[in-house]
Amino acid sequence: MTSTGAAPQDARAGDPRDVGERIASWLEGLGLADHLAEAGLPAFERDQRGVAVWTDPATGDPMTRDQLQALEALLHAEGEDPAYAVPVSLLTVARQARLRADLLGGPWFTYETLAALRGTSLDATRFMIHKTASLHGLLVVDHQGSVLVPAFQMTTEGEPRPELGPVLRPLLAAGMDPWKAWIWLTQPAGLLAGLVPEQAAAKPDTARLVAYAAVRLAERVASSS
C-alpha cells in the first residue's frame, strides 16, 4: 500500500542522531503522528524546544539511536516505494479516527435528548436504552464518559428501528467494538458491494442480504477475539 503524503528526501540518509526528528516530521506531514500508540507503535512528544522525544513503550525510557533506526526501517517496510510506505495498521487506525470524528459530527442522542424526543422521563428512557442494549438490540457508544445512541438506529418517535434487529444482534453478541460497528453500519460495506448496511436493511430486496453480511462479519469478530 502507498500513501500520497510527502516524505523527506532519502529518508534513511543523514546524521543518525536526527533520525527521531526525521521520522516525527514525516509522520506529522502525513497526519499520522497522533495515532502511533493506538496502532501499537512507539510514540513521541515534542519537548519545550520542539524536539521530538520518542519513548520505548516497553520501558518508558527514551529510545536509543538503534531503536529509532529499527523503527524507521519498520515504518518503511511496506509498500512499493520505501520513501512513501506506511504500515497498514497505522493507516487503518488513522482512518478509523477520522471516521469517528465524522460520526460525532452527525446525529446522535444522549439520555436527555432521546427522552425529549420520546416524551418520556429520563429514567424510563435510560431503562429502555440499557435493557435493549443488553439484548443486543441497540448500539450504544461510550464517549468521554458519556453514553451516545447513534441516531440512525432510531425511528422518528425515538424507538429502535425493528429492521435493524437482525443486523445488530449478531454484531453486538459477537462483542464487536461499538465504534467499529457504528462505522460499518453507516459506511459503504465491501460485504454488500458498496451498499450502506443501515440503509439497505430498510429495503425488502436487500434486508436479508444485510442480515447475512452481519452474521458473516460477526463470525470474523468472534474468531479474532
Image (spheres, rainbow, N blue to C red):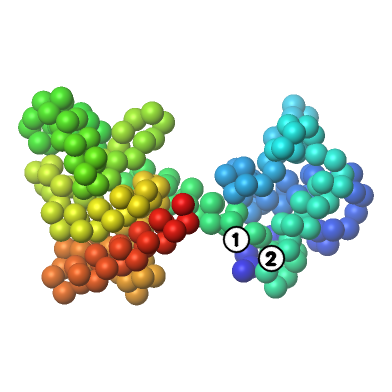
**Which quarter shows the N terminus?**
bottom right
Tell me which residue sits at (36%, 70%) in the image: 191
Tell me which residue sits at (69%, 43%) in the image: 42
Out of 13 and 197, give the one closest to the viewer.
Answer: 197
Q: What element does badge 2 sit on?
A: loop
Amino acid identity at mark 1: Val
In the displayed structure, 134 sits above or below 125; it is below
Q: Residue 13: x percent and y percent?
A: 88, 58
In the displayed structure, 8 sits above or below 158; it is below
Q: Looking at the image, do the residues carrying marks 2 and 1 touch, with CB atoms under 8 Å apart? A: yes
| Residue topped by disc 2 | 78
Tell me which residue sits at (72%, 70%) in the image: 81
Q: Residue 215: x percent and y percent?
A: 30, 63
Is residue 151 shown to the viewer in this render? no
**Would you identify the image quadrant in which residue 90 lies?**
bottom right
* Residue placed furthest toward the right: 15
Q: Residue 88 carries which label?
A: 1
